[in-house]
Amino acid sequence: MSKLLTQTQIQKYNDDGFVYPIDVLSREEANRYLKLLEASEVLQGKRLVKGSNFKPHLIFKWADELAYHPKILNAVEDLIGPNIRILSSTVFPKMPGDGTFVDWHQDGTYFALDPDNQQVAAWVGLSDAPIEAGCMEMAIGSHKLGQLSHAEVASEKHMLSLGQTVNSEFSKEKTEFTPVNAGQMSLHHTHTIHRSGPNTSSYRRVGVTLTYVPAHVRVRVGVSPSAALVRGTDSWGHFIDEPRPKIDFGNEELEFQKYANDLFKAVYAEERKRYSSV
């Protein structure tokens, strides 16, 4: 029996590679998280943008709270089972009129997971994210293609760390935008090819992506990344455990975040040889 998603929603995810909108926060809760995110930016002295937006759940208690949110995890459990680790979290803000975008890509390109078809990404809206604000656009059913090769495109406007962009042929004839309101989320398979356009609205669009994996998956390269066990148990031991932050932006928290990011970069470096053309 499912915990949050309906059978229709689960079927859409399985058929199309994504499902939305899913109510997980009230608008008031979403606004509270947004205010805490903005306070975090003041605390660290810069915006949470490319280069400083990865794994905030390790250094900010609001992001940790979101990563462990029971409604989010209930929906994730409906798709990947009860033993869940969070592999990554990323803040994706788009300022109005700044031209930032994300080109067609698959989230799992550099994750090096085995099996590589069981991870799910939750995109949680802390602000409204309609089409004009640059919501995601999904290539329907593209998760069934498996992992495709990517090129790395240098662009200050591309929001992904390596500018990764699919350079294999795929159909763009059937796509679907996934607008969500503040407090709603979408879920997508990390093989689903997707993109998002610039924010042409009058306000800052903010979302947080939380990528979850079942605890039994492993990394096929010679580096074990860190991933917090957010629900259930783990008898496999393929990941390094992550501590929850005791304080915001503390020295111990920052030190572990750097360690976790270095591990992730090492996995990326190995996997780039397999799937990307530089």
Image (spheres, rainbow, N blue to C red):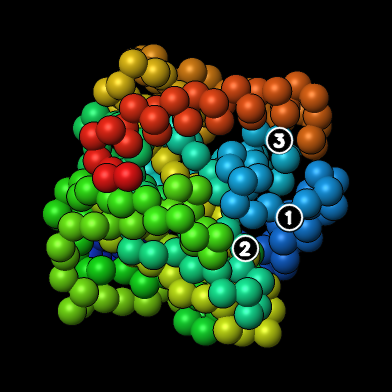
What label sits on residue 93 in the rendered view?
2
* 160 relative to 44 in the view: left or right: left
Residue found 37% across the figure and 51% down from its top: 152
Is disc 3 placed on a helix, strand or loop? loop
Sequence-first disc among 3 and 2: 3
**Residue of label 1:** 47
Q: Quadrant of residue 258?
A: top right
Residue found 44% across the figure and 25% down from its top: 266
Marks 1, 3: nearer the viewer: 1
Q: Which three-letter amino acid code belongs to the residue tagged 2?
A: Pro
**Residue of label 3:** 59
Q: CA distance from mark 3 to mark 2?
A: 18 Å
- Would residue 260 be visible to someone looking at this image? yes
Q: Height in image: 225 above or below 273? A: above
Is disc 1 placed on a helix, strand or loop? loop
Residue 6: % across, % down: 32, 62
What label sits on residue 29 in the rendered view?
none
Contact, mark 1 vs mark 3 (Cβ under 8 Å): no
